[in-house]
Image (cartoon, helix red, strand yellow):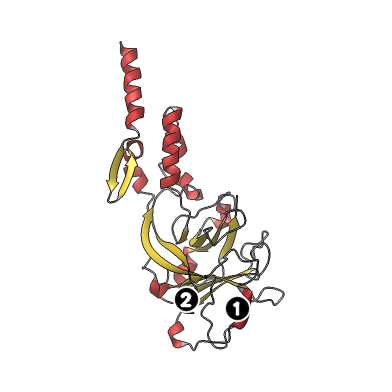
Amino acid sequence: MGFFNFLFNRKNENTNALLNVTVAPNFILPKAFADKWDEIEKSAIDYIEIKAFPSNDIKQTESSFGAVPFIPMNFDYPKDENGDPMLPLAQLNFAQIPSLKDYPIKGILQFYIANTDCYGLDFDNPFNQNSFRVVYIESPENLDLEFNVDFINELLKSENTPIFKPHKLTFTKKTEYIGMSDYRSEQHSFRIEPFLEQFNEDIRNKLETVAYDTFNTNGHKVGGYAYFTQTDPREYEKKLREHILLFQIDSDDEIMWGDVGVGNFFITRENLIKKDFSKVFYNWDCC
C-alpha cells in the first residue's frame, strides 16, 4: 500500500506543479516555481523596457531608432577607419527615460555602427570603436542644432542597417528575474535546468515552456539581463564578465539583425557611473 501511496503522491506533486500562484503584484508563476520564489526573487534586476513604433515624425532631440540623431554645430560626426560616416543606430534621451540606478539621468546617448554588411561588428575586437561608436552628449540643451543633415538621410537608406524604418520610443521601468540567456543565470542559487529534472517529462516540458516565456530577456531595453540567440560572449571571456548590459536592440517587425538576431552594448559599472562610454563593447548574433 505504501508503494501505491508513493505513486499517488508523486502524481499529485507533478499535477500541482502547474497550478498558478500569484507571487507578486501582476506576477503569476506555476506552483513549482512559486515554491522557490524566495530564491528566484534574489535574482531580480531592474531595467527599462523600450517599445519602438515606426514613425516619420521624430524630432532630432527625441529618443529613436534609425532616425536622424541630435547633431550639434561643429559635431565630430563618427566615421569608421576608412573615414566613411557611420550609420545612426539608436538615440536615447535620458531626460525621457525613467531613472535607473547608475545610468544617466539626463543627456543624449547615441549609438552608431559602420556601414558594412556585418553591421559594423569587428569579430576579433568587440571594443573597436572604429567599427561602431557610442557618443554621450551630456548637455544638449546648451548646444545649437545643426540642420544640414541631408547626408544622414542618405545614410539611413543603406542596406547595411538592421533598422528598416525610423522608430519612436517609449519607456517603462520593470523588473526581471533569472535571465536565462545571460551567463549569470548559472550563478544564481536557483537554477532552472537542474530544478526541472525532478518532474516527469510532460510536466517538465510544460514548466520549461513557462520558464522561457517568463524568464526570457529579449526585447529592446536599457540595463537588465542580456538576451542572445547564440551564447553570451562573457561566458567564455573572463575580461568581459565585469561588463553589464548598457543597451539592447532586438529584431522586430521593421528591425532585423541577420536571421532574427539581437544587438547588445556592454559597459563596466565603473565606466557607466563615470559616463565614460569609450570602452563599451558591442555584439550581435542571430539564429
- Point 34% across, 29% down: residue: 15
Image disc number at residue 57: 2
Q: Hey, which residue is sitting farthest front in the picture?
A: 56
Q: Nearer the viewer, residue 285 or 147?
A: 147
- Mark 1 vs mark 2: in front: 2
Image disc number at residue 152: 1
Instruction: Indicate the position of residue 66 as horizontal and vertical percent values.
Output: 55, 70
Q: Hey, which residue is sitting farthest right in the picture?
A: 82
The answer to whether residue 198 shows anywhere in this view is: no
Instruction: Indicate the position of residue 142 as horizontal and vertical percent values.
Output: 44, 87
Q: If the image is split into quadrants, where does the N terminus sit?
A: top left
Q: CA distance from mark 1 to mark 2?
A: 16 Å
- Point 32% across, 25% down: residue: 12
Image disc number at residue 47: none
Q: Does label 1 or label 2 sit earlier along the sequence?
A: 2
Q: Residues within 10 Å of mark 1 (few under 14, many from 20)?
A: some
Identity of the amino acid at label 2?
A: Asp
| Quarter location, residue 96 | bottom left
Identity of the amino acid at label 1?
A: Ile
Instruction: Indicate the position of residue 159 as horizontal and vertical percent values.
Output: 65, 66
User: Is 244 above or below relative to 188?
Assistant: below
- Point 31% across, 35% down: residue: 19
Residue 97 appears left or right of 247: left
Instruction: Indicate the position of residue 21 as horizontal and vertical percent values.
Output: 29, 41
Q: Nearer the viewer, residue 148 or 226?
A: 148
Disc 2 secondary structure class = loop
Q: Nearer the viewer, residue 240 or 37?
A: 37
**Is disc 1 in contact with disc 2, using a CB cutoff of under 8 Å?**
no
